[in-house]
Amino acid sequence: MALTQAVTTRFVVLNDQPVETGEDDLLDAAATARSLVDLITDSHVSTPFTVAIDAGWGMGKSSLMRLMRARLEERGTPTAWFNAWTSGADALEVLIKSVLLNFDRNIVRRAYHRLAKRRRAVRVVRLLLKVVLRFFGVHRLVDELWRQLSVDAKSRNEIRDVVHDMAKDWADGGTSPGRQLVVFIDDLDRCSGDVVLAVCEAIKLYLDVPGLVFVIGCDQAVLARNMQESGGSAGHALGHLEKIVQVYYRTPAPDQESVRRLIDGFADRSGTKELFGDGVTALIAQRTRRNPRRIKRLINSFVLEYHLNRDWQRFGASALVRVILLQHFYPEFYRSLTSTDDRDIVSEFLAYTSVREHCKAGNHPGDDEFFTNHQVAPPPAGADHDVLLSSLDRIEQELPVFFPGLATDKDFVSLIRELFQDADFDELRGYLQHGRPGGLSSPGALTDDEFMNAFLLNRPARSPDAVRLQATQNDLWALMSDLRGPNDPQSLRDLLHQNIDAVNAWPTLVQPGDDKSSPLLRVLWIDDSFTPDLTDDAKLDLIAGAHSRGVRVFQTGIGDLESTKFVIQRFKPGLLISDITRDGDPNAGLDDLAALRSDGIYDGPVIFYTSRVTPSRVKRAEELGALGVTADPRELMSWIERVVADRDTAQD
């Protein structure tokens, strides 16, 4: 999977617009469009009918419909385009008007004269005619028209008759029999259940007349899910579609050759073609599930990062391609690679693949140091196959849970080897772990939550004996008020590193109106990576996210068990979040929880949030009654929400 190093081309972003011309059609969707158009025009005697183009997100529904529309207009068949998502709650109104606006003016006039003597319909019809003849003219008239239609069942029925008569006159008035108007409905699967029902109602009740053909683009699975989220049922949504759709076409994923041609075309247009060899192309095709939009987004991620972050010019575009591939397709490995714990997970993984290969083949791996570094006894010299496999199983208990699966992925192993063989690998790894842009660096006032975090993040580690309650809660908040405002984060750090007595009172901190009887879930987060430089943006973002969910999080960098006991007894948290490795001890967090449980200090829920999730850690956490061990921020937030829900249920 070799990547070219010397790259001089300028990179450009790919747009996400649907394909409308043959020159942009990299998947030859035009051939399918021609076949569908032939079917529609040959079936003119069968109108009205509806064609549904069913495909997943990003699989080219809109592009196929755009190509169909262009083909129809080449043949002189009138078309209309209706975006259900942008029409919103006015979908019924907008769809009907999209059809009426394509009728001849004389047909509208004749309809008016036929209805002029119907006293009850005159007012409504006049309003309708004004709207149609003047396009989207006076909004007040539109509002009045649809207000009357929604409350007056008789007017609604009369308008339906008007539309039917006008459509029939239009269909019969062509120069040749079989006149058609093809209406394309896009983005229906992005709409709420109410909009879906409104569109189905418009087609079935108002526009079910000869000459009209509807082409609906949607993902039926997503449509059903949206209906359920709107209070309906999946069967309800699909049932309405079945009433109006006569022809279903499921857009297939492109075959291997087509997707390679697509990736080559995207790469050529973006200027990245020199970076994509056969191996990278195969990896992208497989991991994006041959989805054109995902492929575009991957390439655009590279282009954007390369343009915005000039540091990549030092490491080279090919290095960035590898990193982007890891970020998009192997997020667990990427999180470990970019973790600030200084572990070289790339070298560790490659060493594991070598050990695994030897043990599976019945050969001694010869790397005793790899075993001893993970506190596992290496297999003895001359060990048989069963002993070697047993040794492999023991070492895998101490390795990240995703290692065995990734070791069977040839494309991934090749990608990692290329990354490791880069001459600047060590510098790149250090950059990914510590040197990427970000952090709390811009001057400005801090919010209350940010200021509280600043106190807790910047306090020096102290034993319980050194904790002196020399400031009351009100003193602390007065001090915070004095220091906030014009001070930038760096000046706050300088002040907090001074001998401020209020900092010593941090275990008793309770925000005004947030006493210990507060309904808020109180969370204590213990992690020795909470350092004075405030650079761990990911954890700060998680804390902000928890606060937005009604969870109060206090974090501390204390590392010894006695301090932890003291803080828990004073703070009385409803949830404990903890790291595992502290001061070189790979099991400190787990051992501390065992002590807290046995001493009766804390029996509540616990989540271990760490960059390294191994089978042995997961098993030990389960034995201690913890919710689990995770490195995934989304999973962490999910578990926090679970604790909140369980707490609310218990209080009810």
Image (cartoon, rainbow, N blue to C red):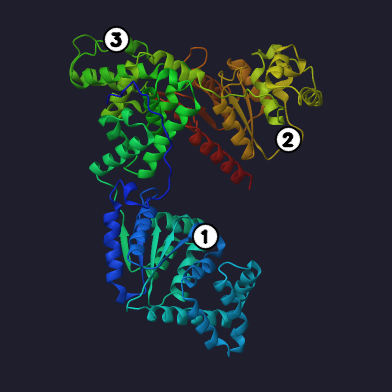
Q: Earlier in the sequence, mark 2 or mark 1?
A: 1
x and y percentages locating residue 57 in the rendered image: 40, 49
Q: CA distance from mark 1 to mark 3?
A: 60 Å
- Picture residue at 39% right of the left edge, 40% below the top: 296
Q: Is residue 343 visible?
A: no
Query: Is residue 371 in view?
Result: yes
* Residue pointed to by mark 2: 514
Q: Which residue has dot 3 on it?
A: 368
- Helix, strand or loop under label 2: loop
Q: Which mark is residue 231?
A: 1
Residue sitting nearer the eye, 15 or 152? 15
How would you rate the neighbour count of disc 1 (Cα within 10 Å): few for under 14, some for 14-19, many for 20 or more?
A: few
Q: Quadrant of the N terminus?
A: top left
State the residue at coordinates (42%, 34%).
12
Residue 180 drawn above or below residue 311: below
Q: Secondary structure beneath disc 1? A: loop
Task: Please report whichever mark, 3 or 2, sits nearer to the chain's N-terminal start.
Answer: 3
Numbered disc in front, either 2 or 1:
1
